[in-house]
Amino acid sequence: MEIIFFGTGTSQGVPMIACECAVCGSADPRDRRTRASIHVVMDGLHVQVDAAPEFRLQCLREKISRLDVFILTHGHADHLAGMDDLRRFCDLHGGEALNVYTTDEGISRVLAMFPYAIAERPVAKGYPAFRLIDLPPVLEFPQGTIRSTLLPHGGINTLGLVFEEKSSGKKFAYYSDCKRVPREAVALARGADAVCLDGLRPDPHPTHMNIAEACAVAAEIGAPATYLTHLTHSVGHAEWSAKLPADVQLAHDGLRLTL
């Protein structure tokens, strides 16, 4: 299994507009963060989770030429604003609609923002087409399984995802954009080879876990390696990497994990 971190930043990205703080002005490339999303490859099955505003640029940077399944964790702009650029993958699928798995809230947001794309086939070559599907608790493919759980994120729930590759048995959990990780989500993630958690910033936030909260959840899950994502400009990569527990790291844009 391969996990590619397309982006690891918040809705404002880092550097942030009109900010001259040390992190926004940092020369460390790990402090340059586009909006958070990942690309997971299980035995050749390419799964994209969320499409940030920089989705096209992220695909070009990571040389992505295939996408089989798209999952939208929730309908906030920093996670779906790049969905129009999925049109290229509809072309590569022979003009077929792309399956978009999400929640009821995600479906309503896609319908509102991309009404022209809700069809079994694109209206013309080069246009997007989305087939909207409620993500079931277990999604089975010949290459592996994707399990989902709901995570509280302010007034909505987001999708937490656990990937398990069939050939290797490797397991990866992705829990971004959440204020806490419920007991059932902790249980689902146990036994994972790696986990990615929302770890917004040092200070508390009403709808996201801060770094201390994320570290506590990491200890509860007990994975060998945990990566924090959705990071603000208050988190300098070098500074905070030195402060974290040995089994917790900061993710960065372009990070690739092979499990």
Image (spheres, helix red, strand yellow):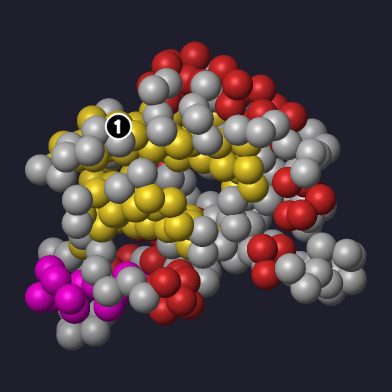
Q: Residue furthest front?
A: 246
| Residue 36 image offset from top left, x and y in percent | 54, 56
| Residue 218 image offset from top left, x and y in percent | 58, 27
Residue in view at x 79 percent, y 39 percent: 243
Residue 63 found in image quarter: bottom left
**Residue 195 falls within the magenta-colored stretch:** no
Residue 174 found in image quarter: top left
| Residue 38 image offset from top left, x and y in percent | 44, 55
Left or right position of 90 against 243: left
Q: Residues within 10 Å of mark 1 (few under 14, many from 20)?
A: some
Residue 219 visible, this orientation? yes
For label 1, the residue is 147
SS assignment for the magenta stretch, majority: helix
Q: Is residue 155 above or below residue 222?
A: below
* Amino acid, disc 1: Arg
| Residue 84 image offset from top left, x and y in percent | 38, 72
* Towards the viewer: 8 or 78: 8
Q: Is residue 148 above or below residue 109?
A: above
